[in-house]
Image (cartoon, grey):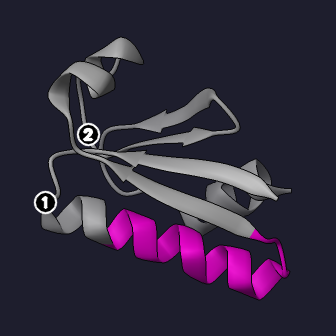
Amino acid sequence: MKDVKVLGPGCKRCVTTAEMVQAEADRLGVPVTIEKVTDYAAIAGYGIVSTPAIVVDGKVVHAGGLPKADDIAHWLA
């Protein structure tokens, strides 16, 4: 089970990012839990200045803009 956090204020890009992660996890058959983190202090705690950002199993793997599906697949593998 992969623990994924999508960091951002809840904007459209953040919602789309969470949907992309879920779709890729479903395609790969990888079980995930996705948590949306919107608290600015919590986001800053990860050292993030540009959102949306993705944290997989406690490691920041992406920040700023929409990720590519290939990258998501790599992070979830």
Q: Where is residue 52 in the image (x, y as percent from the top left)?
A: 30, 46
Q: Does label 2 or label 1 sit earlier along the sequence?
A: 1
Q: What residue type is labelled 1?
A: Cys
Side of 43 where 69 appears, left or right:
right
**Nearer to the camera, 37 or 26:** 37
Report, in whole angstroms, how far the alpha carbon at label 2 lies from the one at label 1: 9 Å
In reply to whether residue 27 is colored magenta, the answer given is: yes
Q: State the SS at label 1.
A: loop
Q: Main secondary structure of the magenta part?
A: helix
Residue ID at (30%, 49%): 65
Circle 2/circle 1 CB separation < 8 Å? yes
Residue ID at (30%, 24%): 42
Q: How busy is the neighbourhood of tag 2: few (under 14 within 10 Å), some, or many (20 plus)?
A: many
**Nearer to the camera, 40 or 11:** 40
Q: Residue 51 carries which label?
A: 2
Q: What residue type is labelled 2?
A: Thr
Numbered range of the magenta stretch = 16-31
Q: How busy is the neighbourhood of tag 1: few (under 14 within 10 Å), some, or many (20 plus)?
A: few
Vertical placement of residue 64 versus 23, above or below: above
Residue ID at (21%, 20%): 41
Vertical placement of residue 15 versus 41, above or below: below
Q: Name the residue under label 1.
A: 11
